Amino acid sequence: MMNKGTSAKKLDILNLFYSLGAVVILLGVIAKLLEWEVQDIFMTVGLTMEAIVFGVSSIKYINKDQSIEKTEFVVDNQFHHEEIAVAPFETEKVNDQLIHSYVLPQTFQQDEVLPFNSKSFPQSDSTHQINVPTEQFAPDLLWQLDKLGIISFPKDIFYQPEWVSLNEQEYQMVSQLFLDLFGKKVVPQKNIPLLKSYEIRLPESGIGELVIEQPVALTNDALKVLLMAFKPYRYKGFFDQFVLYNEGDVNYIRSANTNEIQVYVGEHGALNNYCRLFHANELVVSPALDFLAPFIKMKNEILLDYIIKRFDKHNWKAYELMVQILFDKNDPTKIFFLDKLKSVEYVSDDKDSIKIVQNVIQLLASFTNKNVAKDIFGKLLIIPQIGMRDFRLEERLNFSGLKVSVTEDKYFELNDLFNSVYLNNTEIFNQLLEKLIALKFISNDIVADLFNANQEDTVKEIFNKYTNYINKYQVTPSALQLEFALLSKQILSK
């Protein structure tokens, strides 16, 4: 028996070249999968080294008289240091299996290669399988390379294992799109199953760092395939990161700016024009393609809510487009818009203000409930006042005479009941009514009905407007005003 304490260590040259050759071959396989330029060099060098080592190791002399006595042999290589009881002529066989154990499967035939952790060879001549746990093998080389970052994907490689389900034509289009749009190469489709089969889970590429430096033209088919490619990501953030738009008949895609929002308006021309005219800095209108609609959040009621809340109430062109947008909507949606306005100002010497009033009347004319429209208009249309509360249309005196007859023998002058400012505002609204009727932009009956011009105010209506006038403008009633109030209450209470 050899003395373990006195045995000298010696470098095993064949072992060294076996290992180096195997490492180079594995690097060549990885380079082949990732399409590195050095793939052929790695494979050629590694296979050449292995061929030379196998050739040299085949030359071996055996002493026929050598005893078959088993001895204690120290196996020492870059992976293991163990004592194994072997026959002298089997020493090199054991050493070989230690070197190559990291590339062998977990199931072995007894008459082939034995696992390195066996303390002795099986004595039975029968052939059977031995299952060995993965952790008993030499360290997994791929795992070590991954830990060291050697097999980490470079920045120009994009890997998504779910794309294996795409057909060949779709995958080719995805590959070309990623190269044209993002400057990224994708892992060849035929290699995806092999990469997925590794025990080491390769990192999937995300879309967060994808950037399109310059706008790129895309066909409709290319857009469909692009959305299909991002389906594994459930489209989360896609239209936050990129925007689609068209110029003429050409569709373009680019990275979104910080404040930009992708919107879908379909074939709605007025909504398209509104977004482009008044929200061009933040809203990017997508091409009117039906297959895009499910993937864009900002559309329909969400988009309408957005533009209503940011409506410019002083721009008559905005009113014109908004009327076209809302004309076919239901009454609650129109009311929501008009409530957001709070008021519509009319200034007699401002040409734009009468255009605004025209558009509001057109929208009110589309209401299903005409009484609701009339009530809204009375509260909405105002004449702005300096230093006092605005004068509303519902305060207007719809009365042609100068005197109000409470009883057969008792009359009150209007200028005794209301001040000159109030009467002047009433006259301004009367003049506005005449201007609107003269424009003939809509049926005169509709305009007259909204102004309640078809019938004069009754004593009750004048009394209600007088009471509102005293309270709203905090007027101290005169003797005549008090007399009118008392007499009107007596008459109306009967």
Image (spheres, helix red, strand yellow):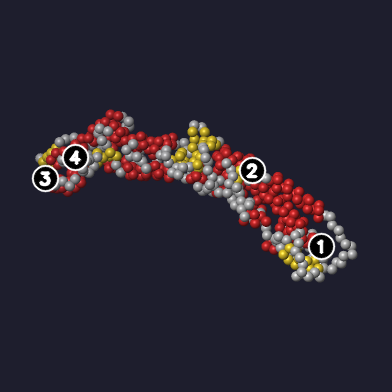
Q: Are marks 1 and 4 in contact (CB under 8 Å)?
A: no
Q: Amino acid at mark 3?
A: Ser
Instruction: Choose between 249 and 403: the one closer to the eye.
Output: 249
- The x, y position of residue 46, in whole percent, is 73, 50
Amino acid type indicated by mark 1:
Glu
Instruction: Please give left or right for residue 442 compared with residue 211 in the image.
Output: left
* Mark 4 or mark 3, earlier in chain: 4
Q: Residues within 10 Å of mark 2 (few under 14, many from 20)?
A: few
Task: Measure how far apart labels 1 and 4 are at the Cα level.
Answer: 119 Å
x, y percentage for residue 88?
82, 64
Q: Residues within 10 Å of mark 1 (few under 14, many from 20)?
A: few
The Cα atoms of the two marked residues, 4 and 3, are separated by 16 Å
Q: Is residue 170 visible?
A: no
What separation in Å lies between label 2 and label 3 (alpha carbons)? 91 Å
User: In which quadrant of the rendered image does the N terminus lie?
Assistant: bottom right
Proximity of marks 2 and 3: CB atoms separated by less than 8 Å: no
- Give the labeled residue for mark 4: 422
Q: Which residue is mark 1?
A: 90
Q: Which residue is mark 3?
A: 478
Q: Position of residue 8 (x, y in %)?
A: 76, 65
Label whose residue precedes the other's in the sequence (4 or 2): 2
> Residue 120 lies in what quarter of the image?
bottom right
Residue in view at x 22 percent, y 44 percent: 389
Q: Is residue 40 left or right of residue 362?
A: right
The residue singled out by tag 2 in the image is: 167
